[in-house]
Each structure stands twice: as structure tokens, then as C-alpha cells.
Image: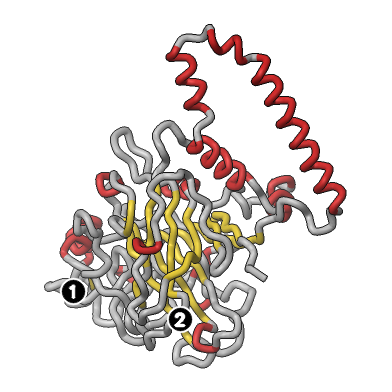
Amino acid sequence: MAPGVELGFAAAAEGPGGAWRLHSTYFPSKVGGRPAWLGESGLPGPAILRCGRCQQPCAFLLQLYAPLPGRPDAFHRTLFVFACRSPACYRLAGPCGPFRVFRNQLPRWNDTYPEEPPPEEPPPGPAPAPPRRLGSGAALCRVCGCLGPRCCGRCRRAAYCGPEHQALDWRRGHRRSCGQHAAGDDSADSIPEHNEFLFPEYEILIEPEEPEFPADSTDDEQEAEETSKDTKEQEELRAAGTADEAFQSLDEETLEAMAKHETEEEKIFQMFKKQVAAEPEQMQNCRQKDLDCIPDCVQIIRYCRGGEGPLWVSGENRPEEKDIPNCICGAKRIFEFQIMPQLLNHLQVDSLGESIDWGTLVVYTCAESCSGGSEYLEEFIWKQDYSMGCTL
């Protein structure tokens, strides 16, 4: 039986009710902020985290916790997506470009996390500041939270992924605090929780997609609906035949516009909008009760590893099998999840000129989910744009 589709929704992560769940200890799925790294070794370095077009550092976009049942080596498994901050890099559709995707997985018994599930209650005391180092000793960039092999030449304490973020942090205040604190005292130069390079932070809540026909519906109900559809189609055909003579008197421009409205592209896009508008019952209940846990009940993620393929926004620019490279282990890559355009509403990336934009982002991962030791392994992402004239 093929797995069902799971939907991801963005929920506010601020305050005592949510932010604590976004730390690595709790194996989060989240948008923005700094990455909550899973494994503490083999992190992707600064060179591979640069945009494939402008070569500037990519910002952390989101991560999904996606363990594989029955796979002891993937008891913990997270996918990480990074994206360029420059709108100009989003002009072209196709593979990778301004995005990078990585996969990391760990067995249940590992050197970083206890084998028991994390507690469901928030930890006592104030929330910890963004970490300077991982438990493994790896230094993290003060700006983006990625691997930071470069350090401040003055204080030798502040770590950065590259010169761009070192210059940004210097302007934002490190110039005033650099060298002003005693050894071991980080209070005078604490890392700010947010900065202009990071995307806004949200928790991703996962819910199963409701089937088109509820499980308790009868075959008679489905047959009745199909019969109703057939009757409606027949009436439309008769109406079309009656109106055929009227069409003869329309000018060529009007006929062309009417034909264009019923193109295959329009049908694909309407199906996309219909599926995206679907909302699980639990999300509906939260909205009806005016709960703050769901600020906007729209899908930002569709997940279905090994099941049905992605929901395309267009019939154009879909990858063929030859366009999706095999994993470095030799196995084919399969569809795992897609990022929906509604996520853009949460990222605050609109501008008067060009903006970061996409129709959908489709992520393909190793069919075998090879372990690669403790390394973060790069996977494949495909960007599809809207066809001309179709927008949400």
C-alpha cells in the first residue's frame, strides 16, 4: 500500500509555547532561523553552501524530520534546504540553482542523543542563546549558524562561514564588543537570535491529507457523484452544440481568448489550487477555535516519500528521469517532498522590484537513503515556475 500524503503548516514559534521545540534535542521540523543540526559531524562546509548562480552564502530555508520506519540506521533522519537571498538568482527554473538540499541520519544509539524520546515539556529557565559550537567542538557562524571555520582576527573567538558574514556581524555590533570581555565570559558579546540574513522562524506542523472520499463513504455515494458528473458533462456538451452557431459570429480574437481559457495548463493549475486549498480536519478545528497555533491554514509542505509524485503547477518544465541524477551511492533518487509557493507569504521576501519566487520546489532523495557514515549528503531539488498567466 502506497503511503499517504502528509501536509506541513507553518505555526508561530515564539514564546514559551513553541520556541524551545525548535532546538536539535527535540528533532524539529521548522522554517527559517538557524538550522537545528541533527548529526554534529560532517556538516556541509561554506563552499558547498553557496548559491550555484551568484556564489553568495545561502540562508537556511527549512528542515523536515523524516525518519524511516524499519531502518535502524535512519531512526533519526532530517532533510535540510538552503536558499539564496538574491531575487535575481530565481529568474530561471530547473535544477538546483539558488538551492541546496542535504540529508543526515543517525541510528537510535548514537553519541549525540539519548535513546529515549525527548521530554514534551519545555526545559526550565530562560531559552538558551544560539550555540557558538556543537558538542563535537565544531564552531558555528554567528550570523547563519552553519559551519564557521573562519574566526575574528582580533578576538579569535567569533566564528564565521566566510568574509561576507564576518563583515555583516562587524557592522551589526561586533566591532563594539570585540575583545571587551574576559575569557570565558560570553555575555558581553552574545549572539543575537535574529538578523537580516535569516528567514523568519516557524515550526512546521505535520498532518495527514484528508482523502477525497472519506473512508466511511459508500460505493453508492461515489457512484452517485460520478453519475452526477457524467450528467453535468452531457448537459455541457449539449449546451456547447447549441451555442456552436453563436460561436461562428464571434471574432477571431474572442475565440482565441476562449480557447486559451480552457488549455491544459489551466486545468493543471486549477487542480493544483484545489489540492492546495484542502485542509485537514484538525487544522479546521484550530482555526474555528481561534487558536494561535495555526496562523495561516495553508499548505507549505507536501510529503509523500515513495508514494504519489509531486503536485505540479504546470505541464511545463517537469524533470524527466534523465534530469534527476543518481545518488553518489549509485541508487536512483525518488520524490520525497515538495515546498509550496505559500511558504513565500511567511518569508517576508516581497519587494518592489524582483522578489524571491517559485511555483513549487520538488526534492528528490536517494531511494536507498544510504547512510554515508555521519556525513551530510547532498540531494537534488527542482524548481518549477508558474506558466504564463497562472498565479495563485
The residue under label 2 is which amino acid type?
Gln
Residue labelled with disc 2 = 105
x and y, in percent, of residue 242 in the image: 68, 15
Query: Which badge, 1 or 2, comes first in the chain's sequence?
Result: 2
Residue lying at 23% horizontally and 73% vertically, measured from the top left: 159
Residue labelled with disc 1 = 150
Q: Is residue 323 left or right of residue 20?
A: left
Element carrying mark 2: strand
**Pick the front one: 279 or 312:** 312
- Mark number displayed over residue 251: none
The residue under label 1 is which amino acid type?
Arg
**Image quarter in which the N terminus is found:** bottom right
Residue lying at 59% horizontally and 9% vertically, measured from the top left: 246
Element carrying mark 1: strand
- Residue 200 appears in which quarter of the rendering? bottom left
Residue 219 seen in this snapshot: yes
Say above or below: 289 vs 81.
Answer: above
Q: Is residue 238 left or right of residue 91?
A: right
x and y, in percent, of residue 97 in the image: 28, 56
